[in-house]
Image (tube, rainbow, N blue to C red):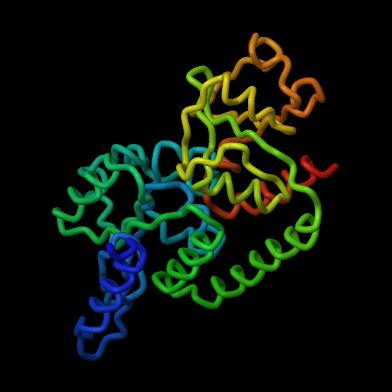
């Protein structure tokens, strides 16, 4: 029987940290990421480059924004980072620009093969890169505390985790006893792409008292119009953002006009930055969606 990947990663991390020698006279910070890679910092990180915006948002929430020395081109919406140099995109970071900033820590998002190739290239340059999955609220809370350790903001991280978990519990208490509202989340149109059952969007829908009609255990699922018509959701969420910049109105799509959500006027446009990015805004998205699903 094959050992589950998450258990194997945990065991690799435990062994690596147990046998890694601590430098004399120092208080090292040893962290194992979600791919089994372990790094040790001799002191809290002082020059951080996030290759995914959710990390920037988490660090800002920790009052650690002053430690950021660069940003991706996609993070122009984060005003505190607007003056920082851009080092490319999440998928195609510019190694030369990154090295020029002399980072002591780089943060990458797990999941895409192209991103992992870039990660290995940066490690080959001797840079510290940690990669984490952010597919659930629990992942967000765990990474928040890890970033707290890495930046000497542990106390703030623990406070935030308690506050955020309490907000999730409040959502469960509010909507847990109600009949779930059936939801479809459009990621892109045309060539219809939906949010699947694996990822932060599904977590947001569930926390808000909804039920995702797309059951495949993937973050993104290609959906044909026939299966959407069969699913016939109560509420249709249209993501607006870089992946879906100018979606057509559902009333202008011939096969969509008779959907239950369209007939009932329950088609809602939501911001990609808030609903599809697994950062602090995901909690606000769940709270907002709860009010939409259960007016």
Task: Pick whichever, 151 or 110, lies toward us.
Answer: 110
As drawn, the residue found furthest toward the front would be 1
Is residue 103 found left or right of 71 in the rendered image?
left
Is residue 177 found left or right of 242 in the rendered image?
right
Looking at the image, is 119 positioned above or below residue 250? Answer: below
Residue drawn at point x = 67 percent, y = 53 percent: 207
The image shows residue 107 at horizontal and vertical percentages of 35, 55
As drawn, the residue found furthest toward the right would be 295
**Which picture quadrant has residue 13?**
bottom left
Quadrant where the N terminus lies?
bottom left
Residue drawn at point x = 20 percent, y = 90 percent: 24
Quadrant where the C terminus lies?
top right
**Which picture quadrant has residue 87?**
top left
Total number of numbered labels? 0
The image shows residue 244 at horizontal and vertical percentages of 53, 25
Residue drawn at point x = 49 percent, y = 28 percent: 243
The image shows residue 231 at horizontal and vertical percentages of 64, 30
Residue drawn at point x = 79 percent, y = 48 percent: 179
């Amino acid at each position: 029987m094959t050992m589950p990947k998450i258990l194997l990663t945990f065991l690799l991390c435990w062994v690596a940290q147990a046998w890694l020698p601590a430098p004399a006279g120092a208080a090292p910070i040893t962290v194992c990421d979600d791919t089994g890679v372990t790094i040790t910092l001799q002191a809290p990180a002082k020059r951080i480059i996030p290759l995914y915006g959710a990390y920037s948002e988490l660090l800002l929430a920790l009052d650690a924004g002053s430690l950021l020395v660069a940003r991706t081109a996609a993070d122009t919406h984060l005003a505190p980072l607007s003056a920082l140099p851009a080092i490319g995109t999440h998928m195609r970071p510019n190694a030369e620009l990154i090295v020029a900033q002399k980072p002591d820590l780089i943060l990458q998002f797990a999941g895409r093969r192209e991103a992992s190739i870039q990660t290995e290239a940066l490690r080959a340059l001797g840079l510290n890169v940690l990669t984490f999955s952010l597919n659930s609220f629990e992942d967000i809370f765990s990474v928040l505390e890890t970033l707290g350790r890495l930046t000497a903001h542990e106390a703030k991280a623990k406070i935030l985790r308690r506050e955020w978990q309490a907000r999730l519990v409040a959502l469960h208490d509010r909507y847990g006893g109600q009949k779930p509202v059936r939801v479809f989340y459009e990621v892109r149109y045309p060539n219809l792409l939906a949010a699947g059952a694996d990822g932060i969007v599904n977590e947001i829908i569930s926390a808000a008292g909804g039920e995702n009609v797309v059951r495949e255990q993937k973050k993104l699922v290609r959906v044909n119009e026939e299966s959407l018509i069969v699913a016939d959701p109560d509420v249709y969420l249209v993501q607006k953002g870089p992946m879906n910049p100018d979606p057509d109105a559902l009333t202008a799509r011939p096969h969509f006009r008779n959907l239950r959500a369209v007939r009932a006027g329950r088609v809602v446009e939501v911001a990609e930055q808030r609903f599809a990015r697994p950062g602090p805004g995901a909690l606000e998205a769940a709270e907002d969606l709860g009010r939409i699903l259960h007016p």
